[in-house]
Image: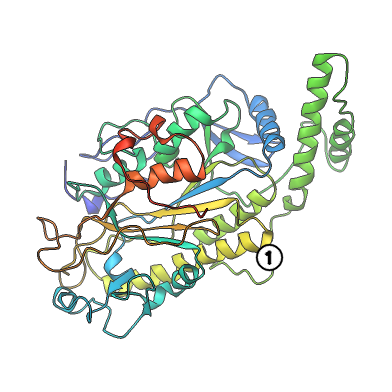
Amino acid sequence: MQSCGCTEYSRAGRGLPAIEPGMPAPAGTGLTRRSFISRVSGLALSVYGASALGPKAFERGIAAAAALDPGGRILVSIFLSGGVDSLTLLAPDPAAHPRYATLRPTLGLPAGQGIAFGEDPGLRWHPAAAGLATLHGEGKLTVFPAVGYDDPTQSHFTGRHYWEVGEVNPGGRWGWLGRYLDRHGATDNPLQGLTLGTSLMPSIAAQQMPVATVARPHQYSFSAAGVEAPVAGDMIEAFGGLSAPDAADPALRYARGELAAVNRLREQLGPLQAGYSTPVGVAYPDVPFGQRLAALAAMIDAGLPLKVVALEAHGTYDTHGAQASTLVPNLQLAIPCLVEFQRDLEARGLEDRVLVHVWTEFGRRPQENGSGTDHGAAGIGFVMGSKTSGQMVGSFPGLAASDLDEDDNLRATSDFRGAYCALLEQWLEVDAGEIIPGAASFARPTLVAA
C-alpha cells in the first residue's frame, strides 16, 4: 500500500467514496443507494441498504421511531480530515519539553504563548483552540493527547479505514457504527445512521440496516401527495386525532396509532418548514460545517429519531507544506463550530442527549520539514459534551528520543478501539464485544461522567 498518495487524497464522489489506487476498499463499498423525499421528516434522503423497503415504509418507520424514543442518546462522529497536527493544537511547552524547540524551530508554538492545559502543565492550547480550552475547563471536553494503535500506518487511506471499521484490518467491510446499527437498529428508520454531507461516511455503513445521507439538512418541508397547503396540514391533523389505542380491531388500532405518530412528528417539524433558527447568543461561523451542525441541533430539537451521526469538519489538515498559513485559519473556523454546537444544545436543553467524538486518522511528525509536517503516528482526539468525564485519557508521551517510537513519531498512550468500546458501553449502553473485534483486550477509559 502506498504510504501517502496525498496528491490523490480524496475519497469524495457520488454516493460512496471512490476507491483510490493502493487503498483499502472503504467500508460499505457495494451498497446500493436509493433517493427519496420523506414527507414525514421533510428531508431529501439518499438511503443505503434495506432496498426491499419502499419510501412509504421508511416514512412510517421514521415517525414510529420518533414516537418510541423521543429523548434517546445520540453519538456524533466528526472527522478532521488529513491528520491534524496535535503538536500545534495542544503544544508541548518548551519549558517542560525542551526538544520541542529543536524539532519545531519555525512552526512550534513559542514559549509562553497559548493557554495552559490544566491536566498537564507541560502542554498548552494554541490560541486558535481557546474554545476547546474553555470547554475543558468546564469539564465538557475529554482529551486524548496521543491516541492511536500499535504498528501505525502512515497512510491516509489505511489509517482512516482502520478508524472507520474499528479494527486494524485493511479488509474490514462495515463501519463500526454500522455494526452497532446492525445489532441495535431498525429495518425502517434510515435516520438512525445519518451522514450530513453528499457521501456516506464509511463509519456508519451497515450491512443489514438502512442508513442515510442528507446533503442539505436545513431544507425542511412537509407535504401530502396530491394535497396542497393549507388543506394538507388540516387533513393530517384530523387523521392524527383519530387515534384510539383501545380500538377493538387490531388493524384499525395499528393504523390509527401510526397516524398519530405521523401527526406528532409533523407538529414537531412544523416550525422548521421555513428553515431553522438558532437560539439567541449562538453564532456559528458561516461555513458548511457550521450550517450542518446548526441544522443538526434543530433536527434533534425537532424530535427526529437519530442514533449516530457522522460528518467531516471544516478544513483539510494534511499540512506537508505551508502549514503556518493554512492550519490556524482552518482551526479558527472548525473549532468555533464545535463550541457553538455545544452552546446550541445547551440553549435548547439537549446537552444531556448528545456526545461528540472528534477524531483524525493520525498525528503529524514531531520534526518539521521546513514549511510543514509529514505523516506521523499518534494524534489528538476529543469527546465533547455535558455528559463526558472531562478527564485526559492517556498521558503525553514526551518528545525525547527515547520517548518516540522507532520511526521518531509520537507514541500512542491510548488505543482508539478502547475509546470505541467505552463509547459503546458507557454512552450507547451496548456490549462492545459484539461490535469491536478483540474488545476484551482494550482498556476502557472513563468517557461518560457517572
At horizontal 23% and vertical 53% (from top left) the residue drawn is: 6
Element assignment for label 1: loop
Residue found at the far bottom of this picture: 112
**Whole-percent x, y for residue 440 in the image:** 32, 36
Whether residue 168 is visible, yes or no, is: yes
Q: Please, which colouring scheme is shown?
A: rainbow
Q: How many numbered tags mark residues here?
A: 1
At horizontal 25% and vertical 71% (from top left) the residue drawn is: 322
Whether residue 28 is visible, yes or no, is: no
Dot 1 alpha-carbon crowd within 10 angstroms: few under 14, some 14 to 19, many 20 or more? some
The vertical placement of 415 against 402, above or below, is: above
**Quarter-of-image position of residue 344:** bottom right
Looking at the rendered image, the quarter that the N terminus falls into is top left
**Whole-percent x, y for residue 101 in the image:** 18, 79
The answer to which of 257 and 217 lies nearer the viewer is: 257
Tell me the amino acid under the disc marked 1.
Answer: Pro
At horizontal 26% and vertical 59% (from top left) the residue drawn is: 363
**Quarter-of-image position of residue 55:** top right
The answer to which of 131 and 96 lies nearer the viewer is: 96
**Whole-percent x, y for residue 96 in the image:** 22, 78
The vertical placement of 338 against 229, above or below, is: below
The vertical placement of 342 against 201, above or below, is: below
The answer to which of 382 and 300 lies nearer the viewer is: 382
Residue found at the far front of this picture: 450
- Residue receiving disc 1: 279
At horizontal 56% and vertical 61% (from top left) the residue drawn is: 341
In-image side of 151 versus 254 (left or right): left
In-image side of 221 versus 169 (left or right): right
**Whole-percent x, y for residue 168 in the image:** 26, 39
The vertical placement of 247 against 317, above or below, is: above
